[in-house]
Image (cartoon, rainbow, N blue to C red):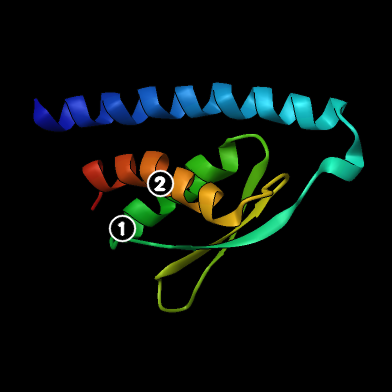
């Protein structure tokens, strides 16, 4: 039962992040292009299982405005392209505290 609830939290968190990212991407696309701050982010991974890494990377890619690019050879860093990341550290912290945290609950 505990695992099922964890998967429900994964789904709920993903839907919430999907909605927030969709609105942010719409604002970015409709706004002035010179205001965008695209970035390649090196996201340090706390998740250690291959399944957890794949789940996190897939959720990042399915969220508008971000795309997973590559996992480092040692499996400790996920490289992500962000459409607009004026504060790189804040963007990394947001991904880790939401999507990665939930991925770790179900696939540590």
Residue 79 lies in what quarter of the image? bottom right
Could you say whether the residue bearing mark 2 is in a helix, strand or loop?
Answer: helix
Figure quadrant of the N terminus: top left
Which tag is nearer the camera, tag 1 or tag 2? 1
Q: Are marks 1 and 2 in contact (CB under 8 Å)?
A: yes
Q: Is residue 69 left or right of residue 95?
A: right
Where is 107 relative to 40, above or below? above
Front position in the image: 25 or 60: 25
At label 2, counting other C-alpha atoms closer than 10 Å, the crowd grade (few under 14, some 14-19, many 20 or more) is: many
Instruction: Specify the farthest residue to the left.
Output: 1
Q: What residue is at 73 percent from the left and 45 percent from the top?
A: 83
Query: Is tag 1's residue or tag 2's residue first in the polypeptide sequence?
Result: 1
* Residue bearing the label numbered 1: 47
User: Where does residue 94 sit, x and y in percent of width and height?
Assistant: 47, 43
* Residue bearing the label numbered 2: 55
User: Where does residue 69 sit, x and y in percent of width and height?
Assistant: 62, 60
Q: Is residue 92 left or right of residue 100?
A: right
- As measured in the structure, the alpha-carbon distance from the residue carrying label 1 to the one carrying label 2 is 10 Å
């Amino acid at each position: 039962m505990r695992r099922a609830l964890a998967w429900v939290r994964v789904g709920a968190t993903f839907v919430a992040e999907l909605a927030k990212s969709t609105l942010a991407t719409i604002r970015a696309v409709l706004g002035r292009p010179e205001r965008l701050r695209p970035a390649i982010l090196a996201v340090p991974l706390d998740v250690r299982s291959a399944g957890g890494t794949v789940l996190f990377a897939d959720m990042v890619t399915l969220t508008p405005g971000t795309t997973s690019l590559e996992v480092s050879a040692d499996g400790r860093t996920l490289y992500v392209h962000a459409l607009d990341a004026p504060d790189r550290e804040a963007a990394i912290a947001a991904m880790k505290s939401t999507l990665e945290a939930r991925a770790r609950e179900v696939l540590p």
